[in-house]
């Protein structure tokens, strides 16, 4: 038994060494590879992305597991009533696009391609006669059909199950045959943070928005969620100043100046070290704050 444990330990160590060498090689390759030329707006775009990711992470931490949230779910059936969002939280209905472009379940294959081209969309929700969202059809679904038809390939009797399913789907002629179902949708009353979280998990750029009966009422784009989640610098500054007022005694808060630029908070003035530590810890917890620059001098 001891010898077996030694062999297992040795293999674990070898695997760790191999993994380390692979990571080192990948890092070296990335350093050697030519990068894309830097553009004037690159820094601003990266900062916006970081702020968006921070807002999505905050939503994940604040709302628990996504599957437990009835207001934003991948669901073929209506969810039970969900709690109302907190006052001041933006909701999906405020940022969604209406009316929503869609495709009827009985629309023929070639007409689907025309609608996608006309709407300049990579995918559109599919609805039934009562406007319930029953799936999503995309360019990928149409391309898969075209590829199967062009190849003439037919899966054998012992072919993989996935291959047979794809072949069966590619033989379809209507949106109902070709669509991916069930669709990932979000309720109009869901918070923007929940919708952004769902879009991130599902890697979607657009999501159908439904009422509680599953009927299509709009479509929400990921960039609209981004803009709604990221507050401007004035909003961040107002919250920072409120934190200063709540954290610091009157004599100390009057000696602090707050500036915010692109989500970066800059504190100047004078403050005792103990108070400054508490203040910095509170400010770093504020959503949309990218960085806190502490330029405070020692106070009396």
Image: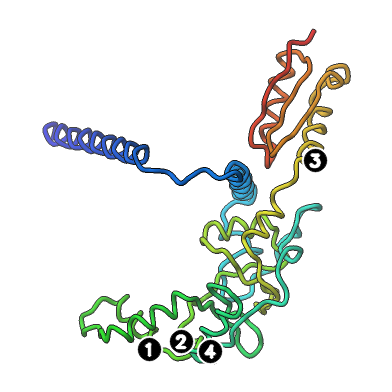
Residue under the image location 78 percent in, 10 percent down = 299
* In this picture, residue 50 sits left or right of residue 244: left
Res 234 label:
3
* Picture quadrant where residue 13 is located: top left
Q: Is residue 258 above or below residue 140?
A: above
Q: Find the distance from the CA under tag 2 to the CA under tag 1.
A: 8 Å
Q: Find the distance from the CA under tag 2 to the CA under tag 3.
A: 50 Å
Q: Is residue 61 visible?
A: no
Q: Find the distance from the CA under tag 1 to the CA under tag 4.
A: 16 Å
- What residue does disc 4 label? 111
Q: Earlier in the sequence, mark 4 or mark 3?
A: 4
Res 177 label:
2
Residue under the image location 54 percent in, 90 percent down = 107
Q: Is residue 153 visible?
A: yes
Residue under the image location 88 percent in, 20 percent down = 250
* In this picture, residue 94 sits left or right of residue 183: right
Q: Find the distance from the CA under tag 4 to the CA under tag 3.
A: 48 Å
Residue 169 location (% of width, % of height): 39, 84
- What residue does disc 1 label? 171
Residue under the image location 64 percent in, 37 percent down = 290
Pick whichever, 42 or 87, lies toward us. Answer: 42
């Amino acid at each position: 038994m001891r010898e077996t444990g030694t062999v297992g330990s040795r293999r674990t160590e070898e695997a760790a060494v191999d993994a380390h060498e692979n990571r080192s090689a990948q890092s070296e390759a990335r350093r050697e590879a030519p990068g894309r030329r830097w553009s004037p707006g690159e820094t601003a775009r990266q900062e916006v992305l970081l702020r968006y990711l921070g807002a999505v992470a905050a939503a994940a931490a604040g709302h628990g597991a996504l599957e437990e949230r009835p207001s934003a779910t991948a669901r073929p059936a209506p969810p039970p009533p969900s709690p109302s969002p907190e006052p001041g939280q933006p909701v999906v209905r405020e940022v969604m696009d209406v009316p929503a472009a869609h495709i009827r379940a009985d629309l023929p294959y070639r007409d689907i391609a025309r609608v996608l081209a006309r709407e300049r969309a990579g995918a559109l929700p599919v609805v039934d006669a009562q406007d319930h969202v029953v799936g999503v059809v995309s360019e990928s679904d149409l391309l898969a059909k075209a590829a199967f038809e062009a190849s003439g390939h037919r899966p054998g009797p012992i072919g993989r199950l996935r291959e047979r399913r794809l072949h069966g789907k590619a033989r379809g002629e209507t949106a109902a045959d070709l669509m991916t179902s069930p669709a990932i949708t979000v309720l109009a009353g869901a918070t923007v943070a929940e919708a952004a979280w769902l879009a991130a998990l599902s890697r979607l750029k657009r999501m159908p928005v439904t009422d509680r009966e599953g009927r299509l009422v709009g479509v929400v784009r990921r960039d609209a969620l981004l803009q709604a989640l990221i507050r401007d610098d004035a909003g961040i500054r107002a919250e920072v100043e409120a934190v200063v007022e709540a954290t610091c005694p009157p004599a100390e808060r009057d000696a602090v100046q707050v500036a915010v630029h692109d989500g970066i908070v800059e504190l100047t003035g004078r403050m005792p070290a103990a108070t400054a530590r508490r203040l910095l810890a509170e400010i770093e917890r504020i959503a949309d704050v990218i960085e806190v620059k502490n330029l405070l001098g020692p106070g009396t």
